[in-house]
Image (spheres, rainbow, N blue to C red):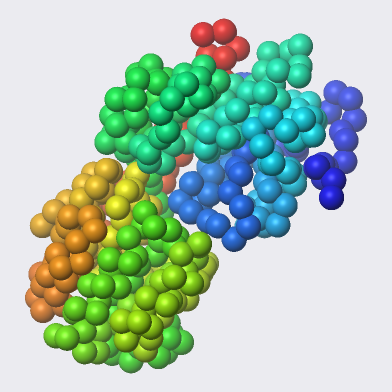
């Protein structure tokens, strides 16, 4: 296998990526670097693609690098992004760094937007091949879990220019590590654009999944231990004693799926739980449900909760990290202690029993999203931070 499949080399003096009519004087030339593998997918990947579409519409140019065979690679190409397959076999693998450096030259990159510490080290090292000033590096940190030690301190303090986080809680937690100057990290809340109403969605999806008129919960997170699915399944087993027709839709995919499917069988929930995998019609799935559940043990700023609230669903969510910035306890949903199946049982059971209260929470949640968490504001703030990061690097700050 070759180390990179790059687009046809551009003619000297011509832009590598055709950009639209620029709306700013000095547009960005961005590379999205993401080392997520195979079928994995999450909120940061959605965020990157949304930002890429916005930046191109504003006249910036955007390319991407991805692991071969990854869903991220496929998604970039579906969005008409110039996407290069890049082997990421280690932080400083010579062939991988040479291929990344070629991408920098091919597209005249001045900003690398990335996730994860490995990508920071790769992006920095590839920039050292050139006598020119290396591209600025901006890292999206979605949670506050970080390694400690010399390598982590070196990476986060010295190899990356600036950071963006999805919540003020996440920013405050990261600052406690001592790796970051406060001026280099900014919290920009996630935002969404509520999809248009689809009056047929509820009936269509319920028919597809054979839900009938049974009360239905939904969770829409990737299958990872930190997402807390196992605690939700335990809670559903308890709830079925009082609500025997209760159903659960589990949307998403990931490393934990086989384990979770086995747990559902062991709990006698094989007929109650629908594992539907990765779906591109999440808004329709949400309309088919009655209550949204976010049982995460850690969470930056949950797009999944915003999507559910925009659909008018009441939320039962873990009171962790940035979640309380989205779900106002008792106003737009109910907050639970993380990893507590009994508390999940109690609060979900309350919403199942008190339908008027649940409906009021759902209505208030939708309005909160419209008032505070719009896509337009998030994208405008992020674009401004990207420009400031690039310009700061050029000035040598």
- Front residue (pair 305, 242): 242
- Does residue 30 appear in the picture of this structure? no
Where is residue 118? Give x, y as percent: 58, 35
Locate residue 108: give its quadrant: top right
Where is residue 216? Give x, y as percent: 28, 79
Tell me if residue 309 comes above or below residue 17 in the rendering: below
Instruction: Report the number of numbered marks.
Output: 0
Viewed as shown, does residue 14 lie left or right of 75?
A: right
User: Which residue corresponds to the image point at 20% horizontal and 67% vertical from the top-left?
Assistant: 341
Viewed as shown, does residue 284 lie left or right of 173?
A: right
User: Which residue corresponds to the image point at 64% horizontal and 32% vertical from the top-left?
Assistant: 91
Where is residue 370? Give x, y as percent: 29, 51
User: Which residue corresponds to the image point at 51% horizontal and 8% vertical from the top-left?
Assistant: 397
- Front residue (pair 395, 142): 142
Tell me if residue 51 comes above or below residue 23 in the rendering: below
Tell me if residue 231 comes above or below residue 189 in the rendering: below
Locate residue 214: give its quadrant: bottom left
Where is residue 301? Give x, y as percent: 34, 46
User: Which residue corresponds to the image point at 34% horizontal and 25% vertical from the top-left?
Assistant: 177
Locate residue 296: give its quadrant: bottom left
Tell me if residue 202 comes above or below residue 100 in the rendering: below
Q: Residue furthest top?
A: 396
């Amino acid at each position: 296998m070759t180390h990179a499949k790059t687009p046809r080399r551009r003619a000297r003096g011509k832009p590598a990526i055709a950009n639209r009519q620029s709306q700013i004087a000095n547009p960005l030339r961005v590379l999205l670097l993401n080392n997520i593998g195979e079928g994995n997918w999450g909120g940061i990947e959605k965020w990157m693609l949304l930002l890429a579409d916005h930046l191109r519409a504003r006249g910036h140019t955007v390319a991407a690098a991805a692991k071969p065979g990854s869903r991220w690679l496929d998604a970039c190409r579906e969005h008409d992004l110039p996407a290069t397959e890049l082997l990421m076999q280690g932080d400083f693998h010579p062939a991988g760094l040479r291929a990344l450096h070629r991408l920098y030259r091919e597209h005249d990159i001045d900003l690398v937007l990335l996730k994860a510490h490995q990508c920071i080290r790769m992006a920095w090292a590839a920039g050292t091949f050139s006598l020119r000033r290396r591209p600025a590096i901006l890292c999206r940190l979605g949670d506050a879990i970080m390694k400690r030690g010399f390598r982590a301190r070196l990476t986060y303090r010295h190899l990356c220019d600036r950071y963006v986080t999805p919540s003020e809680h996440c920013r405050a937690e990261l600052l406690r590590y001592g790796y970051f100057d406060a001026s280099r990290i900014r919290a920009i809340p996630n935002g969404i654009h509520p999809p248009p109403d689809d009056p047929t969605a509820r009936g269509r999806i319920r028919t597809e999944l054979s839900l009938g008129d049974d009360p239905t919960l939904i969770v829409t997170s990737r299958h990872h231990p930190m997402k807390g699915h196992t605690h939700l399944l335990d809670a559903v087993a308890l709830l079925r004693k009082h609500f025997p027709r209760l159903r659960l839709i589990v949307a998403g995919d990931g490393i934990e799926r086989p384990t979770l499917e086995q747990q559902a069988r062991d709990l006698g929930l094989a007929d109650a739980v629908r594992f539907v995998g990765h779906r591109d019609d999440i808004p329709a799935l949400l309309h088919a449900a009655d209550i949204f559940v976010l049982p995460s043990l850690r969470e930056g700023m949950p797009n999944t909760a915003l999507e559910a609230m925009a659909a008018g669903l009441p939320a039962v969510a873990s009171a962790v990290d940035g979640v309380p910035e989205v779900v106002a306890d008792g106003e737009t949903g109910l907050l639970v202690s993380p990893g507590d199946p009994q508390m999940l049982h109690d609060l979900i059971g309350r919403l199942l029993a008190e339908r008027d209260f649940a409906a009021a929470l759902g209505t208030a949640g939708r309005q909160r999203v419209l008032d505070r968490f719009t896509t337009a504001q998030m994208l405008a703030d992020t674009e401004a931070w990207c420009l400031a990061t690039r310009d700061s690097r050029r000035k040598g700050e």
